Amino acid sequence: MGFALSKLQLKSLAFEALGKIPRKHTGEGEDVSPALEWSNAPDGTASVAVICHDPDAPLVLPGTYGFVHWVLYNIPGSVTTLEEATQDYTAGINDAKKQGYMGPMPPEGHGIHHYFFWVLALDKELNLEPDLNMWQLLEKIEPHVIGMNRLVGTYER
């Protein structure tokens, strides 16, 4: 299937689709990841990965754009929820060069930013090493993606 939206559904109890992400989950608050849950994973889902990316961030680097806030993977296919502030599974490196979740913190006066929380269903348990960035993760999982979808939240300072 590759990178195409599927029937996989992603939601959060913390915010509605296109709704404001609560301060608690931002760099201005407790900076903890929101609880997430997904459903309708494709048959054959063996593992899952989660990414949070802000394409509105005013950063353009060679081969990339925006700002990656979270990379989490090696999530078993039987899992359908992540608790708030989760420390489970394998954390990758965000664009601040730190491991784990980094909440929204757009520049003041930059307007509303959109935060894409992606869930990707994979047909194989890859047991990937820690500290991959988003691009490294995507390169390794692309041949195994069988479903994906996103939840978009917003935040403005």
Image: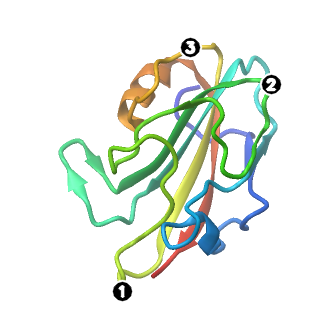
Q: Residues within 10 Å of mark 3 (few under 14, many from 20)?
A: some
On screen, residue 32 above or below 123: below
Q: How many marks?
A: 3
Give the residue at mark 1: 109
Instruction: Name the residue located 69 percent from the left edge and 65 percent from the top edge.
Output: 17
Which amino acid, by three-letter code, is at mark 2? Answer: Ser
* Sequence-wise first label, 2 or 1: 2
Q: Amino acid at mark 1?
A: Gly
Image coords of residue 144 (percent x, y)? 56, 18
Q: Please identify the quadrant where the C terminus is shown.
A: bottom left
Tag 3 near tag 2, CB within 8 Å: no
Residue 145, image x, y percentages: 58, 25
Report how far apart the C-alphas of labels 2 and 1 lie in the structure.
42 Å
Mark 1 or mark 3, earlier in chain: 1
Please report the residue visible at 60 percent of the width from the left and 74 percent of the height from the top.
23
Pointer 3 or 2: first along the chain = 2
Residue 21 seen in the current view = no
Mark 3 lies on residue: 126
Q: Is residue 16 left or right of residue 150?
A: right
Q: Residue furthest left?
A: 62
Q: Secondary structure at mark 2?
A: loop
* SS of the residue under disc 3: loop
Q: Left or right: 135 with respect to 42?
A: left
Reply above or below: 106 against 2.
below
Label 1: which secondary element = loop
Q: Which residue is mark 2?
A: 78
Residue at x-position 71% and y-position 17%:
46
Q: Residue at x 60, y 57 (%)?
A: 32
The front one of 148 and 35 is 35
Looking at the image, which is closer to me, 87 or 147?
Answer: 87
Which percent across, then down, holds residue 81?
Answer: 78, 41
